[in-house]
Image (tube, rainbow, N blue to C red):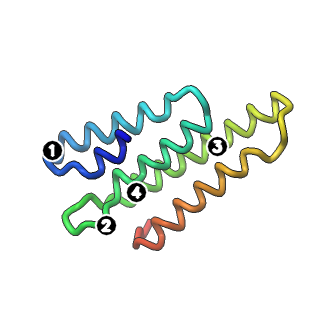
């Protein structure tokens, strides 16, 4: 909800928007469950790329968010395997991250 709201707000200066997006990304990586962290960091990638003409388009930060989500997904996989749960249940997170990569590639992210 917060990420979607920040994405649509246009009243902040560039400096304030930058601070808010970095804080949202940082706090999303501190959620309790690894799967929730991964999904929230993926959603934060949208804060750095907009389809609007005057919106932000920072391809490097998008890729950094998605790489961070990959690291979290790998950590979740290690936790699940250590807990002897069903192997391969982390694959859903990896597919969601791949879907985000493809989305941003389709939108013209050159990175």
Q: Where residue 80 sits in the image (x, y, percent)?
A: 77, 34
**Badge 1 element:** loop
Q: Which mark is residue 73?
A: 3
Circle 2 residue: 51
Of the image marks 4 and 1, the number of the one nearer the N terminus: 1
In this rendered view, identify the residue nearer to me: 110 or 28: 28
Crowding at dot 1, Cα within 10 Å, few <14 / some 14-19 / many 20+, comes out as few
Residue at 81% across / 28% down in the picture? 83
Q: In this view, does 49 lie to the left or right of 88?
A: left
**Horizontal and vertical percent position of residue 101:** 53, 62
Q: Which of marks 2 and 1 is nearer the N terminus?
A: 1
Judging from the image, what secondary structure is the residue with disc 3 in? helix
| Picture residue at 53% right of the left edge, 67% below the top | 102
Q: Is label 1 in contact with label 3 (beta carbons under 8 Å)? A: no
Where the C terminus falls, by quadrant? bottom left
Q: Do the residues labelled 4 and 2 touch (CB within 8 Å)?
A: no
Relative vertical location of residue 2 with respect to residue 64 in this rendering, above or below = above
Image coordinates for residue 39, horizontal then vertical, percent: 54, 44
On the image, numbered disc 4 is attached to which residue?
60
Gap between marks 3 and 4 measured at Cα: 20 Å
Location of residue 22 with respect to 111 vertically, above or below: above
Badge 4 marks a residue whose secondary structure is helix
Does the residue at mark 3 contact the one at mark 4 (Cβ under 8 Å)?
no
Which of discs 3 and 2 lies nearer the camera? The answer is: 2
Looking at the image, is mark 3 or mark 4 earlier in the sequence? Answer: 4
């Amino acid at each position: 909800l917060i990420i979607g709201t920040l994405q649509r707000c246009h009243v902040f200066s560039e400096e304030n928007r930058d601070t808010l997006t970095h804080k949202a990304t940082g706090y999303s990586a501190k959620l309790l469950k690894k799967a929730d962290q991964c999904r929230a960091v993926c959603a934060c990638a949208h804060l750095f790329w907009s389809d609007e003409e005057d919106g932000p388009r920072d391809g490097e930060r998008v890729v950094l968010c998605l790489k961070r989500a990959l690291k979290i997904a790998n950590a979740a996989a290690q936790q699940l395997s250590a807990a002897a749960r069903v192997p391969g249940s982390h694959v859903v997170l990896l597919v969601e991250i791949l879907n985000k990569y493809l989305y941003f590639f389709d939108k013209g992210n050159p990175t």
